Amino acid sequence: METLNPLESAQQQIKRAVDLLTLDPAVYEILKEPTRVLAVSVPVRMDDGHVTTFIGYRSQHTDVVGPAKGGVRFHPQVTMDEVKALSMWMTIKCAVLGLPYGGGKGGVVCDPREMSDRELQQLSRAYIQAIAEFVGPEKDIPAPDVNTNPRIMGWMMDEYSRIKGYNAPGLITGKPMVLGGSAGRGEATGRGAVITIREAAKRLGLDLKGATAAVQGFGNVGSNTAKLLHEMGVKVVAINDVMGGAYNATGIHIPEALEYSRAHKTVAGMPGTTPLTTDQLLTLDVDVLVPAALENQVNMGNVAGIKAKIVCEAANGPTTPEASRVLEEKGVFVIPDILANAGGVTVSYFEWVQNMMHFYWPEDEVNDKLERMMVSAFKHVYNMKETRGVDMRDAAYMVAIERVAEAMSARGWIN
């Protein structure tokens, strides 16, 4: 079977939504490539005195509904095609939620594990220097992604502010709170995922009190999803991370798991649990399965064994296209990643709004706004699914592309 590169995959998904909606072919023609892509060389003086030039990218898919929005990743495998595809998926994710953004994405080809803190800071600042004319609060708003974090966002915001000669917190989201970060941002992706699980359960008539769940991945997203499910009365029976898994048929006490994970850097070996592999976790007989780790985890090798009623894709691309079709045939309710994990970019939007107003909201207000937007987005996608007879993934793409096409029409880009 031919393996598509991510850009071809993104193009096919957009084309499918355009065709299902019977839109003007010009919509696909405009969206099949990003509006702008920048490649930059980023020289950094390393700790031993020599200069290494890193290659960086920034892709802005479309600005038809507003400025571009999307993360910056530091990774040795970053490519221009990957960054272009990720910016296209960000357009879809923002449009599913009705956010006034187009998709953006950036990346630097590097291995941050081999770099000192000083080298990382120099790289972060040099990257922003290279793209400074290309980004900004009204143009393109970066954020953290793979191997980047609030500290790196703080360095980037500081460098941009120095270049501009004034404080510009609205350049970037995912910043430390003291520099204009938003309350509630840390658990926003997990909170959004749990809201979609609750909405799916309502449609299926599934009572979540006492329902069972398994969560793959116990990083920021997985651990917050598990914590919030536990607080709702869901029995989380299995969790795991790269070091191993923990299972207890009567339910794991998630606050204790969080403490154990902080102390031991893993959930493996947690008292009162038995070990299990990733494939064992994914194929447990549970009501809710949350893949919150890497891509392609639910695949043709294990999809036949999946027994969950709801699969909530808290990770990006955790289900292969072939496995997704099998889940649909089996009657599993799949909450696609572009909806399930959109809580993060939604609260990033709130952060940007607060930065632009210089007025900040308490955490309960942020959570209330997130709740309303996630519920509304779920309803729109579910209604599209029901009225058009498609699965939730196609429905999410159709909701998004319909909104983008409407903006194109309003601007006079298409008839």
Image (cartoon, helix red, strand yellow):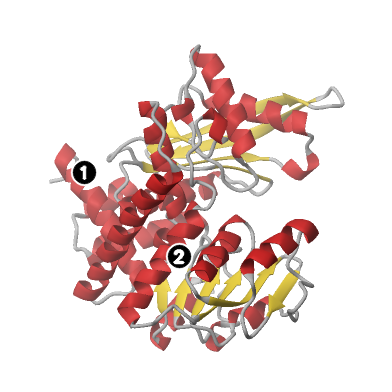
The furthest residue to the left: 415
* Numbered marks: total: 2
| Residue at (69, 29) in percent of width and height | 121
| Residue at (52, 26) in percent of width and height | 131
Q: Can residue 332 be seen at all in this image of the molecule?
A: yes
**What x and y, as percent, mark residue 329?**
39, 86
What amino acid type should be assigned to the residue bearing mark 2? Answer: Val
Q: Nearer the viewer, mark 1 or mark 2?
A: 2
Residues 2 and 52: in front is: 52
Give the answer, above or below, for where 205 lies relative to 167: below
Gap between marks 1 and 2 measured at Cα = 33 Å
> Which residue is label 1 attached to?
408
Q: Can residue 129 be seen at all in this image of the molecule?
A: no
Give the answer, above or below, for where 173 lies relative to 399: above
> Which residue is label 2 attached to?
194
Q: Is residue 77 left or right of residue 139?
A: right
Q: Is residue 139 left or right of residue 171?
A: left
**What x and y, as percent, mark residue 414?**
17, 44
Packing grade of label 1 (10 A; few <14, some 14-19, many >=20) is some
